[in-house]
Structure formats: C-alpha cells, structure tokens
Image (cartoon, grey):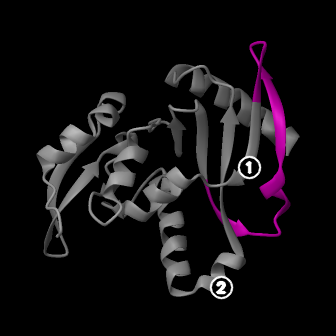
Amino acid sequence: MVTRHTIHYFKEQLTTFLGNNPNAKIVGRQIRKKNRILLENPWEDETISFLLSGRYIPQFIDTINSLVFPPRFSAIFHIDTNIAEFIWSAIPNDEAIISRSFNFNFNGLNYKCYFAQASDKLRMLAKHAVRRKWYSQYEHRNILYLSQYFRDIEEDPDQAEALTPISFFIEGFNSYDETFLVELSKNLNFNMQYLL
C-alpha cells in the first residue's frame, strides 16, 4: 500500500529542518502535469528544490532534519557532527585531489580540512534535487551535477568505476554559526591557493 503524504505531513516531519532553515518552505506544485510536493528555497535559493516523493522518504526526512543549508555557500552543514561539507563534483578516480588533506589554524583553533567522497546525506539530497529555474548565479549549488551523475550511473554502472563524487570537508566546529563559517571560509579560501 502506497502512503499519500501531504504538505501538512511534511511540515510536521520537517519541523527541525524548517527551524534551522527558516526561509525554506514546503509547497505543492505541478511538475510535468503531476502534482508534487517540494521543499523549496533551500539555501535561500529559488533555483533548486527537493522533490518530496519516492520510496526513501523516511531516510530523506532523517537526512534533511540533520542539516543546515548555509545561504552563502554551495555547502551543507551537518548539525549532528558539526562538519561543513562543500559540494564539489564527480571527478576522475585518479585525481590526486581526492586524497588531499591538511590542518588549518584559525583564531587559535585547529580545523581538519580534506577532500573525500561525498557524504551519504549529500548523495540522498542529490537524488531528490530538482531544477526550478534555468539560470542560477550559484550554479544550482553544484548539486545538479551530482544528481546527473547518479542518474548516469543508474543507466551505465561502469561510469561509477571512472568517477567519484567528492566534497570538501571542514571539521572542528563547535556548532553552526553562519558568520563564523563565512569568516573562516574567506581566510581558508585565501590560503588554499598556497596549500593546494
């Protein structure tokens, strides 16, 4: 038996997410002549949404409730582990950057920075991502590239052996603080031209 979820259901189930991302909203829209429920305006960005349907909805709800979407970045912040994950792309497996890591000292504190495979949470998001507008000054937060990658490997699993979806991670935060994340990122971005 298929459960018919409603907007009210998702608003109740995503209370934590909506509290952490107050500009996001859950709405009904017609897409390709079908009525759909979408999570709109993540990152305060109207160009991309997440489709709230499919057999993995309970997992998607758990995933999204553990994330903050920093509006100024193509990133997600894992509030359960206090790790920032910057969305990169799917790149060839032999790229040296995949194993690159370093420590970054900022304001007397040490932050572990590294490239690694995209988290399972980001993979879940990518599978539910929907383009809402064609133009995006933030390149749809890079998530549509990953979404396409997962569609491609469903059609041709051999591609999974050639490419790896990666992200850039920063560990060492005590909690989510957007102002501090911006400050740290500006300093790190300046220094990375010398570190990488």
2 and 1 marks in contact (CB < 8 Å): no
- The residue tagged 1 is 115
Q: Is residue 94 left or right of residue 17?
A: right
Looking at the picture, how far across and down is residue 163, in whole percent? 69, 72
Q: Is residue 35 left or right of residue 58?
A: left
Q: Is residue 109 left or right of residue 122?
A: right
The answer to whether 193 is drawn above or below residue 186 in the figure is below
Q: How many marks?
A: 2
Secondary-structure class at tag 2: helix
The answer to whether 101 is drawn above or below residue 191 in the figure is below
Give, as a single range, the part of the protein colored magenta: 88-111
Circle 1: residue type? Phe
Circle 2: residue type? Asp
Could you say which is closer to the camera, residue 109 or residue 23?
A: 109
User: Does the stretch in magenta take in 105?
Assistant: yes
Secondary-structure class at tag 1: strand
Q: Earlier in the sequence, mark 2 or mark 1?
A: 1
Q: Which mark is residue 158?
A: 2
Q: Which mark is residue 163?
A: none
Q: Is residue 48 left or right of residue 119?
A: left
The label nearer to you, 2 versus 1, is 2
Looking at the picture, how far across and down is residue 184, in whole percent? 66, 25
Most extreme residue toward the front is: 1
Looking at the picture, how far across and down is residue 9, in whole percent? 16, 46
State the CA–CA distance, disc 2 to disc 1. Answer: 23 Å
Residue 189, visible in the rendered structure? yes
Q: Residue at x 53, y 64 (%)?
A: 146
The answer to whether 182 is drawn above or below residue 13 in the figure is above
User: Does the stretch in magenta take in 82?
Assistant: no
Could you say which is closer to the camera, residue 138 or residue 111?
A: 111
Q: Residue at x 17, y 70 (%)?
A: 1
Mark 1, Cα crowd under 10 Å, few <14 / some 14-19 / many 20+, is many
